[in-house]
Amino acid sequence: MSLDEIKISQAIIEAYKDKLIKALDVDVAIVGAGPAGMCCGYYLAKAGRRVVIFERKLSVGGGMWGGGMMFNEIVVEEKAKKILDEFGIKTRPHKNGYYLADAIEAVSTICSKTVKAGAKIFNLLSAEDVMVRKKHVCGLVLNWTSVEMANLHVDPITISAKVVVDATGHAAEIVRIVERKAKIRLKTKTGKIMGEGSMWAEAAEEIVVRNSKELCPGLYVCGMAANAVFGGPRMGPIFGGMLLSGKKLAEDLAR
């Protein structure tokens, strides 16, 4: 068979176009394909929801790739090990109820299983704004990450979603946009982003799960973004809370 470069290009363009069109109106749009965002997408897709995840970087996985300080092993506790077991990720017991997993296996497997469950992941796309109607977050404004990086004056496109989830980690990027531009009072003690506290892994692992919830109509948060918004501590290089956070929010939204 002879290869035709134009037909190869045509195949890529047509397939991506079709995938993007289907993503223009979804049940749940998740921003950030770290462990919490992908875990949330996985369980929502399994529950039959139409889910799309947007990741600004070339690769998914957030900070999980690097484990702690680029030692690519991750640590989880007993409760979160059950999620890794469900994904088929090998774990090894350590001490005092801690379990280890290979960071590369963990990220690649979670990503694969999330896509196979039916969630669509778009990388290299950034959410630069949100759509708000009557104080209700109802969609995202998207542009290529390269446009953002090059500071080009290129207009974005929009997508509609019944629910938007901020899973952008410490930065809580979507919530900050809503706070700054939509002037919506958030469901925090102050009505604004409270900022994350110093590291306290024991407390943070529990608090991040509780903080994964609605912030305002149409906008939810999970993962480290949840503690950044609600004022919880950071947890450092342990990833159980991230997985449990994504699962908890997915279960709440699927009800």
Image: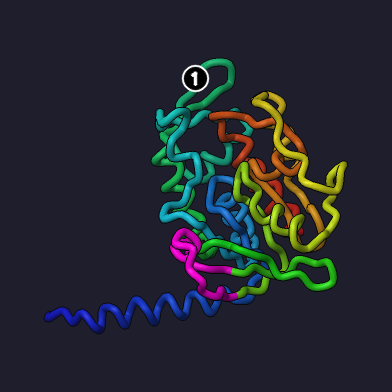
* Position in image of residue 227 (x %, y %): 71, 39
Q: Which residue is mark 1?
A: 94
Task: Name the residue: 40% across, 78% down.
Answer: 15
Q: Residue furthest top?
A: 95
Task: Please determine whether, in this image, residue 98 is positioned above or below residue 244.
Answer: above
* Position in image of residue 101 (x %, y %): 45, 32
Q: Is residue 129 left or right of residue 220?
A: left
Q: Nearer the viewer, residue 81 or 22?
A: 22
Could you tell me if residue 121 is visible in this image? no
Task: Please determine whether, in this image, residue 204 is positioned above or below residue 54.
Answer: above
In the rendered view of the protein, which quadrant contains the N terminus? Answer: bottom left
Task: Please determine whether, in this image, residue 161 is positioned above or below residue 73.
Answer: below
Q: Tell whether position 152 is magenta.
A: yes
Q: Is residue 76 left or right of residue 100?
A: right
| Residue neighbourhood size for the residue with mark 1, other residues' Cα within 10 Å, grouped as few (<14), some (14–19), many (≥20) | few
Task: Name the residue: 34% across, 76% down.
Answer: 12
Element type at marker 1? loop
Task: Name the residue: 43% across, 35% down.
Answer: 66
Q: Tell whether position 84 is magenta.
A: no
Q: Which residues are magenta?
A: 142-157
Q: Nearer the viewer, residue 174 or 223?
A: 174
Task: Name the residue: 51% across, 65% down.
Answer: 120
In the rendered view of the protein, which quadrant contains the C terminus? Answer: bottom right
* Position in image of residue 176 (x %, y %): 70, 53
- The amino acid beneath tag 1 is His
* Position in image of residue 170 (x %, y %): 62, 42
Which color scheme does this rendered protein use? rainbow
The quadrant holding residue 200 is top right
Could you tell me if residue 50 is visible in this image? yes
